[in-house]
């Protein structure tokens, strides 16, 4: 079956507001030039300002959803978002790699909902390093990176060291100052994406958008550094799209200019 657009599979939670999760991912994938497929990890009860609860999908049911899609579609690029725990993540990632050893997996390690709901109260760091070896890139924000890698004083050096396992895209949305600096760590090397910080640019689901955009840019054939640059630009456009917490997706976005 010929497909002009590359398939990108989002494995994420359902957010009824459409700002985050699987709906946001598919919008982002389509806007970036891919064809979005989706597998549900949780049904959440939330809007853009409140998160009440999540009903988790079991690992076996997540795998069954993936399997039926892989029987039909040639999928090489995967984005994983909200997931119940590290054990479920391990089972899902291992299942994908068993079916496609060359699969590129982007994991957005959602530890806390924007409305304040906490996930993953504890992280087994040996387990985390083992998982990272099967993942192409993880996309934490600064607070998430501090929890994942338990190093608040020398985070830069810690991420340089951890990037031997997989690439790490560090989001600077929680930073301060007039310049926003996202960083991409690849095998002990750091690349910086410096852009003027956008005022009043907080958006529900911006982390989902960044990771889904990154996965899609990789699916389009770009190397990781270029894909990171384009994902950064797309997310900035999303952040600046309006003054509400729900961003708009621009399907004619040009990566050649910073919008």
Image (cartoon, rainbow, N blue to C red):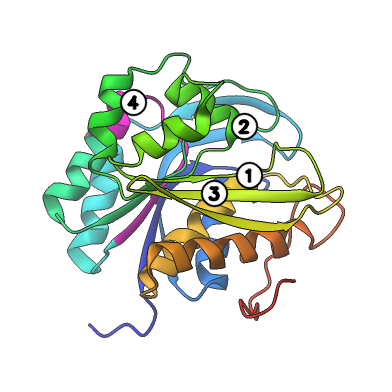
Q: Which of marks 1 and 4 is in front?
A: 4
Query: Tags 3 and 2 in contact by the CB under 8 Å rule?
Result: no
Q: Residue at x 68, y 72 (%)?
A: 250
**Which is nearer the eye, 25 or 67?**
25
User: Cα distance, mark 1 to mark 3?
Assistant: 31 Å
Query: Tags 2 and 1 in contact by the CB under 8 Å rule?
Result: yes
Asked whether residue 19 is in view, the answer is no
Residue 187 painted magenta: no
Q: Give the mark nearer the N terminus: 1 vs 3.
A: 1
Position in image of residue 60 (x %, y %):
24, 34
Position in image of residue 128 (x %, y %):
31, 27
User: Cα distance, mark 3 to mark 2?
Assistant: 32 Å
Query: Tags 2 and 4 in contact by the CB under 8 Å rule?
Result: no
Residue under numbered circle 2: 45
Query: In the figure, is residue 145 to the left or right of 73?
Result: right
Residue 84 painted magenta: yes
Query: In the figure, is residue 225 to the left or right of 96?
Result: right
Residue under numbered circle 1: 16
Position in image of residue 141 (x %, y %):
58, 37
Query: In the figure, is residue 34 to the left or right of 51?
Result: left
């Amino acid at each position: 079956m010929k497909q002009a657009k590359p398939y990108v599979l989002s494995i994420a939670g359902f957010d009824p507001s459409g700002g985050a999760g699987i709906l946001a991912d598919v919008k982002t994938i389509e806007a970036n030039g891919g064809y979005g497929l989706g597998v549900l990890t949780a049904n959440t009860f939330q809007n853009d300002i409140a998160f009440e609860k999540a009903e988790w999908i079991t690992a076996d049911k997540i795998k069954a959803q993936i399997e039926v899609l892989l029987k039909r579609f040639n999928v090489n690029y995967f984005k994983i978002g909200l997931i119940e725990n590290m054990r479920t993540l391990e089972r899902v990632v291992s299942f994908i790699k068993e079916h496609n050893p060359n699969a590129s997996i982007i994991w957005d390690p959602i530890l806390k909902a924007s409305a304040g709901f906490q996930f993953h109260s504890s992280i087994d760091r040996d387990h985390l390093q083992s998982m990272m070896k099967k993942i192409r890139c993880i996309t934490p924000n600064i607070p998430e990176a501090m929890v994942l890698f338990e190093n608040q004083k020398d985070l830069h050096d810690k991420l340089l060291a951890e990037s031997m396992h997989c690439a790490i895209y560090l989001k600077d949305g929680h930073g301060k100052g007039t310049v926003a600096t996202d960083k991409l760590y690849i095998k002990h090397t750091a690349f910086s994406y410096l852009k003027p910080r956008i005022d009043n640019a907080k958006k529900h689901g911006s982390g989902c958008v960044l990771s889904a955009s990154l996965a899609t840019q990789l699916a389009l054939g770009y190397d990781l550094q270029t894909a990171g640059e384009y994902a950064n630009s797309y997310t900035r456009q999303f952040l600046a799209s309006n003054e509400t917490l729900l961003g708009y997706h621009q399907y004619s976005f040009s990566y050649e200019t910073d919008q």
